[in-house]
Amino acid sequence: MASTSDLDMLVNRLAASLKNDNLMIPAMPELVSKLSRLVGNPNLTTKELARVIGSDTGVTAQVIRMSQTLRYSNPGTTITSLPAAISRIGLNSTVSMALALAIEQSFYFRNPVVVRYCHAELARGFMICSYALTICSLRYGIMPNLVFDYVVLASALLNIGYLPFLVEVDTYVLAQGKSYSLEYDALRAAADKIRYPLGTAILRHWRFDKSFESVMSQEPDNTVEFYTNSLAFARQFIEYAEANGIPVHEPATPDESYAPLTDEESVARIRSWMREQGLVDERE
């Protein structure tokens, strides 16, 4: 049986490595690296972006599928190719979406408890994204593409701090043999101790914009934009809803989560909560 002290040992080892500046940070996935170089490129073409994304069949399939979701849907046209999907979504939005999808694919583990925990956190990230986009749509009305792109990418980075720790746990448990078991609740508690400093270190090493560091915090930061804080607001609403027995929508896939909610009852509850929190734009 894995003890809490085993997990604490791994947490302390990572914390010491972080402090001594010798932490082995996971390499940026190749597709993420290629896409990161395209962010903000004014000369980017559909052909070039399709070539980069097309190297990953999984991300390609999801981008095509998302181009046919409610946000981009044109009922008279069926999208069957990546260039057509990019044209419908837009170059910058496709880069952000593909980055988010590629980052999510980094979470691959062997131990069933680690896999279960990882899936649960990714699912929660999907849910937070959906609610964050809903909150933004209520605040801004027609949501600017900048807001949508940022929230989608930031939601994929919410869990990035778990990555080095779960890699350590997965490797450690495998080395102990089949008789060694891992407790889910102990894993979750240990991961929460280290995810924020590790996540910050990864974002800095991967050279993401500093504003993304704030999305991992539980509390909004008054110095950043509303849409950056929207993920913290979404997390707070979800916790409020769960504490009060209010049903929450749980997207099963990224394409479900990368769109605001549409059912009127959920939207009304969120709007009411936003008013209580003083988050609704004054024009409303």
Image (cartoon, helix red, strand yellow):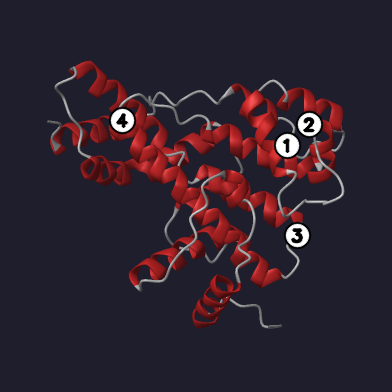
State the residue position of label 1: 64
Q: Amino acid at mark 2?
A: Leu
Q: Amino acid at mark 4?
A: Pro
Can you tell which mark lies on residue 144?
3
Can you tell which mark lies on residue 245?
none
Q: Horizontal and vertical percent for residue 105?
A: 53, 31
Q: Horizontal and vertical percent for residue 187?
A: 25, 40
Residue 194: quarter of image:
top left
Report if the CB atoms under discs 2 and 1 are less than 8 Å apart. yes
Q: Is residue 241 in view from this perspective? A: yes
Q: Amino acid at mark 1?
A: Ile
Q: Amino acid at mark 3?
A: Pro
State the residue position of label 2: 82
Judged from the image, the secondary structure of the residue bearing numbered disc 2 is helix
State the residue position of label 4: 112
Residue at point 38% right, 24% down? 22
- Distance in Å between CA atoms under marks 4 and 1: 31 Å
How busy is the neighbourhood of tag 1: few (under 14 within 10 Å), some, or many (20 plus)? Answer: many
The first of marks 4 and 1 along the sequence is 1
The first of marks 3 and 4 along the sequence is 4
- Distance in Å between CA atoms under marks 2 and 3: 23 Å
